[in-house]
């Protein structure tokens, strides 16, 4: 952390308090007050990576907060333009390293829409299953790491136990633990291993059986409740103004989920009549509500994964992908594909000039919008609440910077 000091005198300080000639925080308009500008990051451990926050403090009270992003920028959108349609999957895989499968999925859906490729039904349901398992892995990371940021170290060990159970089956099918690289234009890389569906079912049962231990540890903790209830309240109006999505938006009562509202893959059936899909919402909009939505979404995703398993078992043997030409070219035109990724809406705007590489591929990542609202939430809070609010926005810095 580095600091610099600024001095506010008289009317200047009064402007911050909102009434001319008085300065409530300092005790009077005639009193010279001294604010402090504090740089948190870009390597502070509570900022989820190389994110910098420039905050102005009056004692322990935050006056302003400015997120400074870009330290992890890799220029992925420009790199898309010099990679062919098979290679760009690798670039999309990495910006949100907790949601790698979901990132791959958005790109291949956009390319398949442009090229008119119809994916085999077994690939559709296998993709849906893997997307929901990836969602659970993402949420478990935040269910363990967020309590750590407000002083509770034990939950992360429980969360990682459940993550490891699911990581084993994800690693078995794809060969990767973080960057799965299992999606391909036209389907999946290869067929599912023999007996894999049974091992996934056993993993889901184990996680479901042990989850109450993690939930009781956190939600039964009065200190955790005190640190998060009523802290960082986000209104539906701010959600819409900043384009916030995912669990954060739904915790403020914004009932939007693309899996139900604009279904893709097998979600039309899963969220249809009689399906196990449901959208989790809360109305409080505080840090506790955001965490609670994440917790319940784990249960929903496990239900969806079990439904996908049953569907895959009922399907006859068949291909998992389609044969592609040696050089894959998308016809001239444009399309926009978006998905309900674990952190929110991911959008992929693809423009083609008929070549083997995209002319333009614009990535709309969820974390950028989610973190943009931070300056609206923290003014008036104390420094101790800053980390609690920041952690509840559930972002990945690579997803912000791309």
Image (cartoon, grey):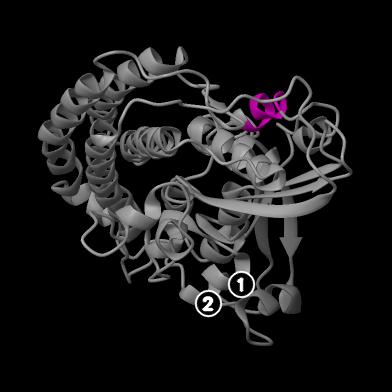
At a point 14% along the width and 27% down the height, the residue shown is 206
Relative image position of residue 366 (x, y in whole percent): 57, 50
Relative image position of residue 267 (x, y in whole percent): 38, 52
Secondary structure beneath disc 1?
helix
Placement of 21 over or under 245, stated as above or below:
below
Instruction: From the viewer's side, name the closer residue of 92 and 69.
Output: 92
Q: Is residue 267 magenta?
A: no
Would residue 174 be found to the left or right of residue 374 on screen?
Answer: left
Neighbour class for label 2 at 10 Å: few (<14), some, many (≥20)? few
Instruction: From the viewer's side, name the closer residue of 58 and 255.
Output: 255
Instruction: From the viewer's side, name the closer residue of 187 and 1.
Output: 187
Q: How many marks?
A: 2
The image quadrant where one finds the C terminus is top right
Residue 329 visible in rendering: yes
At a point 56% along the width and 41% down the height, the residue shown is 118
Q: CA distance from mark 1 to mark 2?
A: 6 Å
The quarter of the displayed image where residue 315 is located: top left
Secondary structure beneath disc 2?
helix
Relative image position of residue 299 (x, y in whole percent): 22, 46
Q: Which residue is mark 1?
A: 241
Relative image position of residue 282 (x, y in whole percent): 31, 66
Neighbour class for label 1 at 10 Å: few (<14), some, many (≥20)? few
Task: Please give the label number shown on residue 237.
Answer: 2
Give the extent of the magenta segment: 86-92
Mainly helix, strand or loop, the magenta region? helix
Q: Is residue 90 magenta?
A: yes
The quarter of the displayed image where residue 148 is located: top left
Q: Are marks 1 and 2 in contact (CB under 8 Å)?
A: yes
């Amino acid at each position: 952390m580095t600091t610099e000091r600024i001095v506010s005198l008289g009317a200047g300080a009064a402007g911050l308090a909102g009434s001319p000639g008085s300065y409530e925080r300092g005790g009077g308009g005639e009193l010279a007050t001294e604010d402090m500008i504090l740089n948190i990051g870009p390597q502070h451990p509570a900022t989820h990576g190389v994110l910098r926050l420039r905050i102005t403090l009056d004692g322990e009270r935050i006056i302003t907060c400015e997120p400074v992003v870009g330290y992890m920028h890799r220029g992925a959108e420009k790199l898309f333009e010099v990679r062919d349609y098979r290679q760009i999957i690798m670039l999309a895989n990495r910006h949100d390293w907790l949601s790698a499968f979901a990132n791959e999925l958005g790109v291949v859906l956009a390319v398949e829409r442009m090229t008119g490729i119809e994916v085999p039904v077994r690939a559709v349901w296998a993709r849906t299953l893997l997307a929901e398992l990836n969602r659970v892995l993402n949420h478990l990371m935040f269910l363990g790491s967020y309590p750590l940021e407000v002083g509770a170290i034990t939950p992360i060990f429980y969360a990682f136990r459940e993550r490891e159970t699911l990581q084993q089956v994800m690693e078995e099918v794809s060969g990767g633990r973080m960057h799965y690289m299992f999606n391909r234009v036209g389907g999946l890389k290869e067929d599912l291993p023999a007996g894999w569906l049974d091992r996934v079912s056993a993993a889901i049962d184990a996680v479901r059986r042990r989850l109450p231990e993690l939930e009781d540890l956190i939600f039964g903790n009065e200190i955790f409740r005190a640190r998060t209830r009523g802290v960082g309240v986000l209104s539906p109006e701010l959600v819409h103004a900043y384009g916030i999505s995912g669990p954060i938006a739904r915790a403020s009562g914004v009932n939007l989920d693309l899996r139900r509202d604009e279904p893709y893959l097998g979600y039309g059936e899963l969220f249809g009549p009689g399906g196990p899909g449901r959208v989790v919402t809360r109305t409080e909009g505080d840090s506790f509500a955001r965490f609670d939505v994440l917790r319940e979404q784990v249960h929903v995703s496990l239900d969806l994964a079990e439904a996908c398993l049953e569907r895959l078992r009922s399907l006859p043997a068949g291909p998992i992908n389609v044969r592609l030409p040696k050089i894959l070219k998308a016809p001239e035109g444009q399309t926009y594909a978006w998905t309900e990724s674990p952190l929110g809406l991911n959008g992929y705007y693809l423009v083609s000039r008929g070549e083997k590489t995209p002319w333009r591929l614009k990535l709309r990542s969820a974390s950028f919008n989610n973190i943009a609202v931070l300056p609206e939430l923290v003014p008036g809070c104390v420094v101790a609440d800053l980390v609690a609010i920041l952690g509840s926005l559930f972002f990945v810095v690579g997803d912000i910077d791309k």
